Image: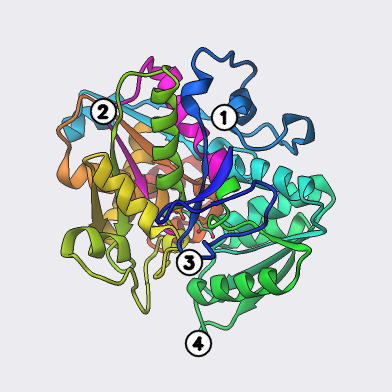
Amino acid sequence: MIQRCIQCDTTYPLDQVIFTCERCQCVLEIAVDAASLSGVKLSGRGVWRYAPFLPVDVKHRVSLDEGGTGFHDCPTLGKAFGIDRLFVKNEGENPTCSFKDRGMTVGVTKAIEMNAVAVACASTGNTAASLAAYAGRAGLKAIVLVPGGKVAMGKIAQSVVHGAQIAQIAQVEGNFDDAMRVVQELSADTGSVYLLNSINPFRLEGQKTLAFEVCEALGDAPDALVLPMGNAGNISAIWKGFREFKEAGFTTKLPRMIGVQAEGAAPIANVVNEGASDCYVANPETVATAIRIGAPVNWQKAVAAIRDSGGLAATVSDDEILAAQRELAQREGLFVEPASAAPIAYLKKHGIDAGTVVCVTTGHGLKDPDAVLRVAPPIVQVKPTVSSLREALKL
Ligand code: AN7
């Protein structure tokens, strides 16, 4: 395996700490000779089941038993949306309750292999929570920079309890995109601070294992996979996983990749659907704060995943997101955070012409209880008597 620029193919050794190509400044990926893994034996469960596909040594692994998340058949919503077979791959069932753990177990393992002293990220919340937990487990210092005001409280609490050094940028002075720029500069200046945003291609290698699990659960790849996009690392990683599993002979087909953004933060949809030349939105805004991102670092990878797979990029409104969140919770028993409800909102709105559809719900609903309670009716007050209860709830 080797690091390779996705644009000009310049290669860099695995032990070089580098995140953008020296020649053309584009992002890098880990080139894996998946054909050579044909027939390889997979054992155990979760992310490390797929160790032969990963660019770190399993002996050094820093793990909290991530991956192996629930794969839920959702017949009620499938029927309502006109989909033959709808499954939800519920990434909120990871150790810190988001998909970031798949990437972080590999990323922090890489940090240990590189003798890092500290790891850092900019975050809309989930990356920070995951980084903090894995850094704690590994005995590394965690440095986290978040945009002020708009990060869900559960995610901040996780970062704090796991012992991260956390700072926020005042809301008027900057958003996630500014935080991203600052931590990139910090890690470039400070050799011992290892950057673990999804611009780090090692992290994405962990996240690609979701594709492997879906393929093993179904016996082949699905027809379409739908997921939210923010910095666009996950769609890129999962698409890479599907391609590698097919190249290694484990599957016969590839899914269409459908990336969903919130209307107020849709730079990738603008590029794919309107031919915008810059992948940039100046003031991203959405109730789905996890994907409140205007300058996604992996946009070229995401656009390639969408185009090469015959997929699409779509947008949904905040109201549609919140309605889909309630519908998934009430009809299938799955409570996901607003960003994770975006793909459900897309399916509800547009349906899809595909037999087997997998929707990736990226984070747990308890991360952000405020988003639910802000729009919920107040809870009625009753006296401690049955008659009062009957009257209040019309029983
Ligand atoms: C629940 O934590 O960017 O498109 O800093 O938390 O791979 O960025 C979170 C992103 C979707 C988007 N769903 O994933 C962060 C951060 C949830 C998320 C995304 C995020 P990418």
Callout 2 secondary element: loop
Quarter of the figure with the N terminus: top right
Crowding at label 3, few (<14), some or many (≥20) Cα neighbours within 10 Å?
Answer: few
Element class at badge 1: helix
Q: Are marks 3 and 2 in contact (CB under 8 Å)?
A: no
Q: Which residues are magenta?
A: 203-231
Q: CA distance from mark 1 to mark 3?
A: 26 Å
Cβ atoms under marks 4 and 2 closer than 8 Å:
no
Q: Is residue 228 magenta?
A: yes
Identify residue type, mark 2. Answer: Asp
Residue 201 appears left or right of 136? left
- Amino acid type at image mark 3: Gln
Name the image quarter holding the C terminus.
Answer: top left
> Quick one: which residue is furthest to the bottom in this view?
172
Binning the other alpha carbons within 10 Å of mark 4 as few (below 14), some (14 to 19) or many (20 upward) gives few
- Mark in the foreground, 4 or 1: 1
Which residue position is annotated with label 3? 25
Pick the front one: 300 or 211: 300
Q: Tag 2: Cα neighbours inside 10 Å, few (<14), some, or many (≥20)?
A: some
Q: Is residue 143 above or below residue 135?
A: below
Pointer 4 or 3: first along the chain: 3
Percent x, y of residue 137: 80, 45
Q: CA distance from mark 4 to mark 2?
A: 43 Å
Disc number for residue 53: 1
C-alpha separation, residue under disc 1 versus residue under disc 2:
23 Å
- Whether the residues at callouts 1 and 3 have beta carbons within 8 Å, the answer is no
Mark positioned earlier in the residue sequence (4 or 2):
4
> Does residue 377 show up magenta in the picture?
no
Q: Please name the amino acid that badge 4 sits on.
A: Val
Mark carried by residue 223: 2
Query: Which tag, 3 or 2, sits closer to the chain's start?
Result: 3
Distance from Cα at disc 4 to Cα at disc 1: 43 Å
